[in-house]
Image (spheres, grey):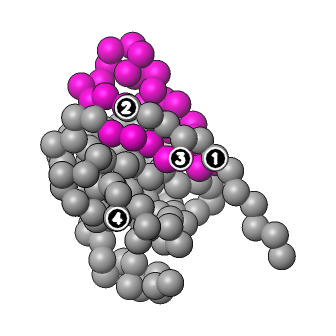
């Protein structure tokens, strides 16, 4: 397990749609792209426990959504699901991704559904190959 500080050091801050967004990417560029979409109220660091394993098989991409984790938290933002989906699409476009898989959790499930709806409506130049929605619980 790595610390949050180490997680941050291994990521980048990107200007996406006028906001500073924390991003992480790892794995082979030749591997299928896997987009990780975190839940609420959390951040990309949720994926830390499975990050190494996933990057052995995929080109893994994630970010802290607007208002979460290390990303900007503008006071005047509406924090719409569509806005979060716009940020993901802009980042994927910037990376040159044309096809990807999604692993989403909680609030991220709704963002993933928005991305799927855009694909169905032909409002996306990227193809979602598969989606996995899940929820996990911490048991103490």
- Real-space CA distance between mark 2 and mark 1, rounded to the nearest whole angstrom: 17 Å
Task: Classify 10 Å Cα crowding around label 1: few (below 14), some (14-19), many (20 and above).
Answer: few
Task: Classify 10 Å Cα crowding around label 2: few (below 14), some (14-19), many (20 and above).
Answer: some
Circle nearer the viewer, 4 or 2: 4
Q: Are marks 1 and 3 in contact (CB under 8 Å)?
A: yes
Q: Report whether residue 102 is seen.
A: yes
Query: Mark 3 or mark 2, which is nearer the start of the sequence?
Result: 3
Q: Which residue is mark 3?
A: 104
**Residue 56, disc:** 4
Q: Position of residue 65 (x, y in %)?
A: 44, 54
Query: Mark 3 or mark 4, which is nearer the start of the sequence?
Result: 4
Q: Which residue is mark 1?
A: 134
Toward the right, the furthest residue is: 140
- Real-space CA distance between mark 1 and mark 4, rounded to the nearest whole angstrom: 21 Å
Which picture quadrant has residue 26? bottom left
Circle nearer the viewer, 1 or 4: 4
Q: Position of residue 29 (x, y in %)?
A: 18, 55
Q: Which residue is mark 2?
A: 128
């Amino acid at each position: 397990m790595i610390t949050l500080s180490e997680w941050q050091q291994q990521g980048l801050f990107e200007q996406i749609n006028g906001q500073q967004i924390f991003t992480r990417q790892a794995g082979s560029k030749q591997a299928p792209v896997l987009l990780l979409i975190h839940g609420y109220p959390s951040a990309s660091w949720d994926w830390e426990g499975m990050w190494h394993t996933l990057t052995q098989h995929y080109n893994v991409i994630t970010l802290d959504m607007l208002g979460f984790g290390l990303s900007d938290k503008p006071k005047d933002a509406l924090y719409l699901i569509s806005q979060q989906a716009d940020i993901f699409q802009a980042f994927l476009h910037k990376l040159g991704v044309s096809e990807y898989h999604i692993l989403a959790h909680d609030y991220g499930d709704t963002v993933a559904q928005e991305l799927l709806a855009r694909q169905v409506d032909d409002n996306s130049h990227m193809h979602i190959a598969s989606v996995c929605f899940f929820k996990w619980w911490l048991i103490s």
